[in-house]
Amino acid sequence: MAVWRFIFSVPVLLAVALCGGKEARGDTEVRRIVSLAPTLTEVLFAIGAGDKVVGVTRYCDYPPQATTLPHIGGIVDPLYEKIVSLRPDMVVTLTEHGSVRRELERLRIPSLTFHHHDTSGIIQSISVLGELTNHQDRAATLAKSLRDAKERTAHCVAGKPTPRVLVSVGGHASSGDLEKIFVAGKDTFYDELVTLAGGENAYRGPEITYPSVSPEGIVMMNPDVIIDLLPTPTDDEHLALLRKRWERLSIVPAVKHNRVVVFAEEVMVNPGPRFDRILSRFVQVIHPELRCESTVDREGAASLSPSLERSE
């Protein structure tokens, strides 16, 4: 389930649909919200609307307060009876929730759909949810801080070389082999962050959001940098297994020049209102020679390169 949650979360307001024949109104404050995605739950708490959230999925674990709320099932398999019992006046969903939204419509439960496929979509969800929950000021402050982080980073990396970057997003976390690696494809959240951080996506294959690639495929992509993302912290034994796995590809520039870095923390796999932290870490890895203003500390990074130290 870890990989599915990973790819789902990795997943602009695409559609605003109040089911049951009603239309969305910007001046209508919602008071009882069910969230069907960890990143949307995080947005609601980040803008100060956590007290309006009455139900979340079992995977909504940030901030910690979210874990105390009633669970309505999984991300793609919610318990509709539970949702109905919570009497929400709004269910917030992502574009991936197509079949779920159809069932909500059948039940005449209002829903809002957002996409978190890119940073603009995340910022837009912050602004819209701020309006709907009457938390406009805090939402505006958060949205501005994220836009500012993007602008500072763009200024910092402007004119610098753009190394080829491969972002690995799971499929190997338990086995430690390279036979089935999922990577960030084009027009994805991580593709955008690589570009913002001054690199270019090494994946140039078919337009699949998160394709699986073989070791031979990785060699063909010839990445200068590999960023390996794990959804949870891991121990030294597992890191050693990962190190040995990547060493098999010694002809790849990223491996040859010790530019493979593992990040093992949940923030790195949740495209939400903390994306500025992900962006800062990407800059650290892609352009270690730079000291951008928006760069955060190295907490959570475990490098296979001696040039970056693992934080405890």
Image: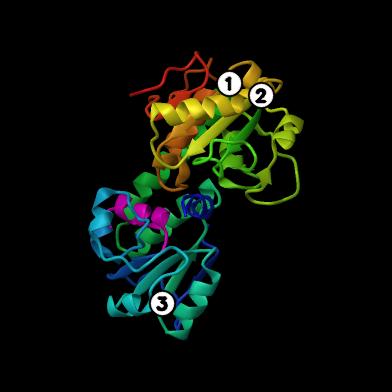
C-beta proximity under 8 Å, tags 2 and 3? no
**Which amino acid lies under the numbered mark 2 shown in the image of this protein?**
Asp
| 312 or 126: nearer the viewer | 312
Residue 25: percent from left, percent from top: 41, 73
SS label for mark 1? loop
Mark positioned earlier in the residue sequence (1 or 2):
2
**Which amino acid lies under the numbered mark 1 shown in the image of this protein?**
Arg
Residue 229: percent from left, percent from top: 50, 37
Q: Which residues are magenta?
A: 36-49
| 171 or 149: nearer the viewer | 171
At x 50% / y 40%, what residue is drawn? 173
Q: Which mark is residue 259?
A: 1
C-beta proximity under 8 Å, tags 3 and 1? no
**Image side of residue 209 versus residue 105, left or right:** right
SS label for mark 3? loop
Which residue is label 2 attached to?
A: 224
Residue 225: percent from left, percent from top: 62, 26
Mark positioned earlier in the residue sequence (3 or 1):
3
Would you say residue 160 is visible in this rendering? no
